[in-house]
């Protein structure tokens, strides 16, 4: 299988680069910029892509790669900082631009026989830089310019090293996918071979080799990721997979009962149902820190799984529905990028586990997980359900988690989802949910003063969960939802609407 390595230099768009490559049918992985040359030689990727980054290549602490990387015979595409880095290391010169360039610019294509093949003569591109290439390295030609950048695209076709000053991975660069396509297929000569069918076939073989004759305990959370992971493992080892579905008291209204029925009877999984709400609530008593909540929930899940594992012989592995965004957000696996938060099934797990982990979806984005689910026979309705966090409502209750506060949030959240579906909005949204704040506000109900709790409504649109925009819900819709919540949910007298994008916010509040 062909593979491309994206070396991360701290860009906010690094994940988008990998996604765009995969959309073209080529497998892409993100690695830190300082990955060892020996690793690259051993793995032999068919191409390298250098991401953008916030620093200047001439600064003392700038992230660099050894110049020998260009002698490995691996084609390279540098983006923004990555293009400047190539110029800097290959005897060109990079300096501060007299005028910074942010936002849309018009790329003028001077040579459309290489990287810019079949592009329009003038094409909109997205710029984000304060430096520029002032001297092009020997052996390179300039094939594209903008009004502010004399070397917007540089190419050394003999050595297969290319650089673009703009960001082809973002939607604002109208012909960005064509540039990636030219690099991968026209210039490097790859053939698309990354399909979900191939992924399933390879992953099933890998699971069988890893597990041998042992048994696997799978953590079913009730969401898409854990179900797809379980079905994939079930295809590999059959009834030696034991799924544990835990009622941790942090699920949505009626979610546990409905999904337990689905898992057992629709998909034929061997499911052990565990009622553990009192245990989780006791562990969370008095805890307000979101990071502590996630870690406590992760550890408590492990305690439950350990107890269940003792009931079965030869359980050696724990399976989880971890996906690529979980890994990316939980730890700086990509180089200088910052950790955002611990996911309960990644950063929230204890350092010493009594099981070996199996995470068959670890390298997939959410849309790819859904495509695997379709291949495995999961109904579209289930796959298209909105993402639900592993720690459940615990991270949608800001502050302490109690049975009373859970009951309030469940009811408010259920009302919101009823109205979202009634308005025909569910399929248009990435997520719709309610959040309970740790503040009270003054109100008037039935001619009496009230001092009650505040619910936040969060409706967002997104393609992959890595970025998101708030949904411009109508005033009538918001009024209807707010009126129902205030009238039907005891203890709530105020409803507000979150209109923050990701970034700067995350989709969830914790």
Image (spheres, rainbow, N blue to C red):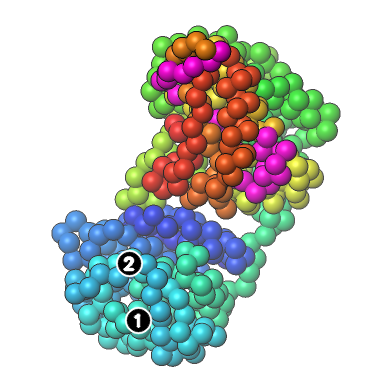
Q: Position of residue 267 (x, y in %)?
A: 80, 34
The one of 460 and 24 positioned closer to us in this rendering:
460
Magenta stretch? 419-446
Characterize the local packing of mark 1: few (<14), some (14-19) or many (20 or more) Cα atoms within 10 angstroms: many
Question: Is 460 one of the magenta-colored residues?
Answer: no
The one of 274 and 406 positioned closer to us in this rendering:
406
* Residue assigned mark 1: 146
The quadrant of the image that shows the C terminus is top left
Q: Position of residue 291 (x, y in %)?
A: 40, 27
Q: CA distance from mark 1 to mark 2?
A: 12 Å
Q: Which residue is the extreme one toward the front? A: 447
The one of 296 and 455 positioned closer to us in this rendering:
455
Quadrant in which residue 126 is drawn = bottom left
Q: Secondary structure at mark 1?
A: loop
Give the residue drawn at x 58%, y 29%: 482
* Residue assigned mark 2: 102
Report the side of 386 relative to 137 (left or right).
right
The answer, for residue 212, to whether it is visible in the render is: no
Give the residue drawn at x 71%, y 38%: 421
Report the side of 255 relative to 294 (left or right).
right
């Amino acid at each position: 299988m062909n593979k491309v390595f994206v070396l991360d230099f701290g860009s906010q768009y690094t994940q988008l680069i990998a996604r765009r490559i995969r959309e073209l049918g080529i497998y892409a992985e993100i690695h830190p910029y300082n990955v060892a040359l020996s690793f690259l030689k051993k793995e032999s990727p068919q191409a390298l892509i250098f991401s953008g980054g916030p620093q200047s290549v001439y600064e003392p602490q700038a992230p660099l790669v050894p110049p020998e990387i260009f002698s490995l015979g691996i084609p390279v595409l540098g983006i923004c900082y990555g293009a400047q880095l190539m110029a800097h290391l290959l005897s060109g010169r990079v300096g501060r631009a007299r005028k910074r360039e942010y936002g849309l610019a018009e790329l003028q294509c001077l040579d459309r026989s290489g990287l810019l093949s079949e592009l329009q003569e003038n094409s909109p591109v997205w710029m984000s830089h304060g430096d520029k290439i002032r001297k092009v390295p020997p052996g390179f030609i300039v094939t594209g310019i903008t009004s502010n950048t004399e070397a917007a695209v540089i190419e050394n076709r003999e050595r297969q090293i290319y650089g673009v000053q703009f960001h082809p991975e973002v939607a604002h660069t109208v012909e960005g996918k064509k540039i990636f396509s030219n690099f991968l297929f026209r210039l490097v000569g790859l053939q698309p071979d990354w399909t979900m069918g191939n992924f399933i076939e390879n992953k099933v073989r890998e699971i069988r080799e890893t597990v041998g004759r042992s048994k696997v305990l799978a953590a079913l959370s009730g969401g898409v990721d854990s179900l797809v992971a379980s079905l994939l493992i079930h295809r590999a080892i059959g009834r030696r997979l034991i799924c544990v579905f835990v009622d941790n008291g942090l699920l949505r209204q009626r979610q546990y009962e409905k999904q337990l029925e689905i898992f057992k009877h629709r998909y034929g999984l061997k499911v052990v149902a565990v009622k553990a709400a009192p245990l989780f609530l006791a562990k969370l008593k008095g805890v307000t820190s979101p990071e502590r909540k996630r870690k406590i929930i992760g550890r408590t899940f492990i305690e439950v799984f350990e107890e269940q594992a003792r009931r079965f012989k030869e359980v050696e592995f724990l399976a989880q529905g971890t996906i690529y965004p979980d890994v990316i957000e939980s730890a700086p696996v990509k180089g200088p990028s910052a950790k955002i938060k611990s996911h309960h099934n990644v950063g929230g797990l204890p350092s010493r586990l009594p099981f070996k982990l199996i995470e068959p979806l670890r390298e997939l984005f959410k849309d790819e997980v859904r495509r695997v689910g379709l291949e495995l026979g999961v109904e579209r309705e289930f796959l298209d359900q909105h993402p639900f966090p592993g720690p459940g409502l615990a991270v949608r209750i800001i502050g302490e988690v109690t049975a009373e506060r859970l009951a309030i949030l469940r009811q408010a959240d259920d009302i919101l989802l009823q109205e979202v579906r009634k308005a025909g909005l569910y399929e248009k949204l990435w997520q719709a949910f309610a959040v309970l704040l740790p503040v009270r506000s003054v109100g008037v109900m039935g001619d009496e003063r009230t001092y009650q709790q505040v619910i936040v409504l969060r409706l967002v649109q997104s393609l992959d969960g890595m970025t998101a925009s708030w949904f411009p819900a109508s005033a009538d819709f918001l009024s209807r939802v707010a009126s129902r919540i205030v009238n039907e949910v005891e203890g709530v007298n105020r409803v507000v609407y979150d209109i923050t994008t990701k970034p700067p916010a995350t989709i969830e509040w914790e």
